[in-house]
Image (cartoon, helix red, strand yellow):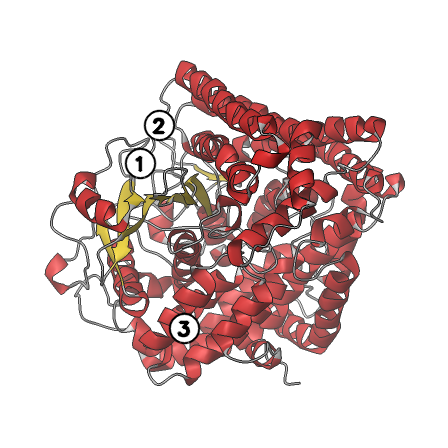
Amino acid sequence: MLQISRAGAILVAGLLGLASMPTTTSASPKQLSDYQSAAQKANVVFKLPLWEKTPAQLQATMETVMSIADQRLNAIIALKPEQRTFTNTITALDKAYLPVSAAAERIDVIQETSPSKEMREIAAAATRRLETWFVDTSFRRDLYKAVKDFADTHPEVSGEDAMYLKTVLRDYRRNGMDLPKEKRDRLQLLKNRLNDLQLQFKRNISDAKPMVEFTREELEGVSEDFLNNKEVLGKDGKYRINANVTWQILEVMRNAKREETRKRLSIARTSRVLKKNTPLFVKILKTRAEIATLLGYKNWADYRIETKMAKNGQTAWDFLQELNTGLEPKFKQELATFTQLKAKDTGNPDAKIHYWDIGYYKNQLTKTRYQVDKDKLKVYFELEHTLNGMFSIFEEIFNIRIEPVEAPYKWVDDLRLYAISDANSGAPLGLLYMDMFPREGKYNHFAQFGVTPPARLPNGKYQRPVAALVCNFPPPGNGKPSLLTYDDTQTLFHEFGHALHTILTQVDYMELSGTSVPRDFVEAPSQMLENWVRDKKVLDRFAVDYRDGKTKIPADVLNKLEEVRLATVGTYYRGQLAYGLLDLTIHMTTDPKIFDNVVDVTNKVIGEVYLPVPEGSGLIASFGHLGGGYDAGYYGYAWADAIAADMASVFRKAPNGFMDKPTGMRLRKEIYAVGSSREIEDSIRAFLQRERSLEPFFEFIGLKK
């Protein structure tokens, strides 16, 4: 997911001799100073931020950037009508917000990654303060009047300038700036309240530490590598699984033979912040509904989706329901297969498949019917080797260079930093941090976070972006390097796609650059890159057994993995559709009765579309996507999947398949580089060189239409 979304990357030295690895990295990291000559030639600013290391520094940064931004905004307001130009009034608005946006991004990374609980808490408080500043500033009537009065002169603009002006005026309208004062004041109060509630909701999820204790017998079927990992094996010989850590959950849910073990862990997972977050989420829903009503929208979904490709809640709902109906026969067939496996496994002819069974019996189906043990594929995806292989692939098709750089400051010892530059000109494009392994208090999933936003500065130089990939891959242990699963590798490629979307931007306006695209499109360029991991020719470039450095994944194994995907894709998407439909169910209404019973309402949707969650639990309370960012937007994953499949079909038909450089360069130019500087449909059409089609997606999910 991108933080905003899904995100990730890696690192720890492999046991394999580097000579046998595809590597794009030099023996020792470069210094940032090595890039400054090229940066000067390209007229770009290529540097890291000064990271705050103490609460006092966080406080000072917060006050300083707000003061600078206020001064810039006041300068816009102070201009006389005859002095106004597009540059000093409209363009200046984007420049005025830049220092606060940059600080907010960086402080968010500190909040989600700092090993210090005190720093995380102070950063969370600073984030709330900056969010309040953003809301309060967006309600400044004097600023709105300055912008609106100039816009009413109908300046002749085109391209990025026209798109930015359109976005600014749209956002002011959506902020109720033409409402009576008493309604604006109420709206401002509600937006600040919503920010506080959402931040607390997500913080509660990150801070949760639901430990479930098991004996070795209860973890029968789980790999020895996992059982010997110091993260889970206590000195007393007992195993404590953190239900808030993704890699631990997946390992047990996919492999533990005992149903009671899977059930206990599933309950812990779906109940981990039920008491804390349920009342918070009820307040969030009621606040969102009141905001939407004040602004004249039917509901929160219509308000949130207006700026996206779907445009309104009903379109998103219809899209999900059409998929839901289309997948019904396939979903039932897949459940019947899982049920047969369970009946045979347990000796109970009346066995039923439960929510906590899906991962396990998907894995069993893979092993029995298709004779593929995904756990045994880990040896092909040693972390360092996989990373270098991925770098090599995207260096080639996007004509870029990726090199390790010495990080002047690291918040954890194994943090990595990479510089990305254009291979032809040498022009620096961006810097990327990689924080790969789980630890207490850290963000517990996968996401890209901005660190320094890209933007054209007032002095004419272009500030190249800095981003961070925050992931939770299995750490190394027991004398072995970090070994990724096949699914982990897809996640890595996906998350690196978000980083490329940020770093390859060429848009002058911060507001329109990189991943600042409609949320129901933002996942498409990243989801598309998952296809590279399914292609034999691509995998052969890096996927080798780390123990001998030469054995590659057999073609028949990859063919069987594709058969497995098609055999279980209905179950996967019904799960995704359940989450999307429960999201829209609670956001396409203003009924307080639904909000007060949100756990029962959403549990019911999951049960009807997918499978019932464990009794007494409530997934909604720990559904971090809906705490802000993907609210009324989870449908966007499936929506973006449809676009991603269409885009991937262009590579499949290209002369060199997924390694086709002309197609890769068109993706870089028409999708990654342009962000939201033009209508997203125009960008998609420019890449596809035709109109969009759903046919590749229906084929991808096993539905011919």
Between discs 2 and 3, the one toward the N terminus: 2
Q: Residue at x 24, y 68 (%)?
A: 544
Question: Dot 2, how many residues are within 10 Å of its Cα: few (below 14), some (14-19), or many (20+)?
Answer: some
Callout 3: few (<14), some (14-19), or many (20+) C-alpha neighbours within 10 Å? some
The image quadrant that residue 24 belongs to is: bottom left
Which quadrant of the figure has residue 399?
bottom left
Q: Which mark is residue 51?
A: 2
690 vs 1: above or below: below
**Residue placed furthest toward the front:** 82
Amino acid type shown at disc 3: Arg
Question: Residue 161, how many percent across, how many down?
Answer: 54, 52
Which residue is at the front of the view, 342 or 151? Answer: 151
The answer to whether mark 2 and mark 1 are in CB contact below 8 A is: yes
Total numbered badges shown on the rendered structure:
3
Label 2, label 3: how far apart the Cα atoms are: 39 Å
Question: Please, is residue 484 above or below residue 665 in the view?
Answer: above
| Circle 1: element type | loop
Amino acid type of the residue that numbered disc 1 sits on in the rendered structure? Leu
Mark earlier in primary sequence (3, 1)? 1
The mark found on residue 48 in the picture is 1
**Number of the front mark, 2 or 1:** 1
Which of the numbered marks, if any, corresponds to residue 534?
A: 3
Q: Nearer the viewer, mark 3 or mark 1?
A: 1
Q: Using the image as rendered, state which of residue 122 and residue 559 is in the foreground.
A: 122
Q: Position of residue 347 (x, y in %)?
A: 61, 67
Q: Residue at x 40, y 55 (%)?
A: 506
Q: Quadrant of residue 140?
A: top right
Answer whether residue 2 is visible to the viewer in this image: yes
The residues bearing labels 3 and 1 have C-alpha atoms spaced at a distance of 35 Å
